[in-house]
Amino acid sequence: MLLRKLAARPLIYVAGPLSQGVVATNIRTALLAAEQLWELGFVPHVPHLTHFWNFALPHEDTRHEDAFWMQLDFAMLEHCDCMMRLPGPSIGADMEEDKAQSLGIPIFHDVSEAEAWIGFVCPIGSATAINLSARNNR
């Protein structure tokens, strides 16, 4: 049952700063956005969490398209329905946004844009629409 509900939810890629500024703060910001997006009916993918993978098994610098992490991120983007671009300077997030544009993936810069989009693409009667209306009646 859970898998069917997840399948009805659009997959959204959360792009934003990681290494510019305080890494822990940037990860928390991305996770807060992911929480909001989940509540709206999305399945968020937060690439910031690969920070912990890189901590355990370091890979080369990510600031070029051929880097391990960028290749992983680009592969994931190909499966996403849309992207949330968080504010702030980021070479990696800029490359991810460029890749999303080349794939024709909608890019949002505010949660309200994502909310409007999901309301449009998830018609009443879908699992997501039912879950959202149930949440609004609490």
Image: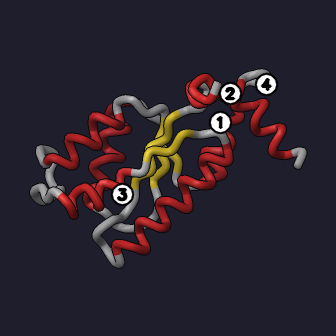
Q: Are marks 1 and 2 in contact (CB under 8 Å)?
A: yes
Q: Residue at x 21, y 49 (%)?
A: 69
* Residue that sits furthest to the right in the current view: 137
Taking the image as shown, residue 57 lies to the left or right of residue 17, namely left
Q: Residue at x 45, y 53 (%)?
A: 85
User: In the image, residue 135 lies at what x, y percent?
Assistant: 81, 44
Q: Which of 75 and 135 lies nearest the eye of the viewer?
A: 135
Q: Label 3 amino acid?
A: His
Q: Residue at x 27, y 49 (%)?
A: 95
Q: Give the label on residue 48, or none.
A: 3
Going from the N terminus, do you reach mark 3 or mark 4 first?
3
Instruction: Say which of marks 1 and 3 sits in front.
Output: 3
Mark 2 packing: few (<14 Cα in 10 Å), some, or many (20+)? some
Q: Are marks 2 and 4 in contact (CB under 8 Å)?
A: no
Q: Give SS at disc 4.
A: loop
Q: Which residue is mark 1?
A: 118
Going from the N terminus, do you reach mark 1 or mark 4 first?
1
Taking the image as shown, residue 100 lies to the left or right of residue 109, namely left
Q: Residue at x 70, y 31 (%)?
A: 128
Q: Which residue is mark 2?
A: 122
Q: Which residue is mark 4?
A: 124
User: In the image, residue 72 lies at what x, y percent?
Assistant: 24, 41
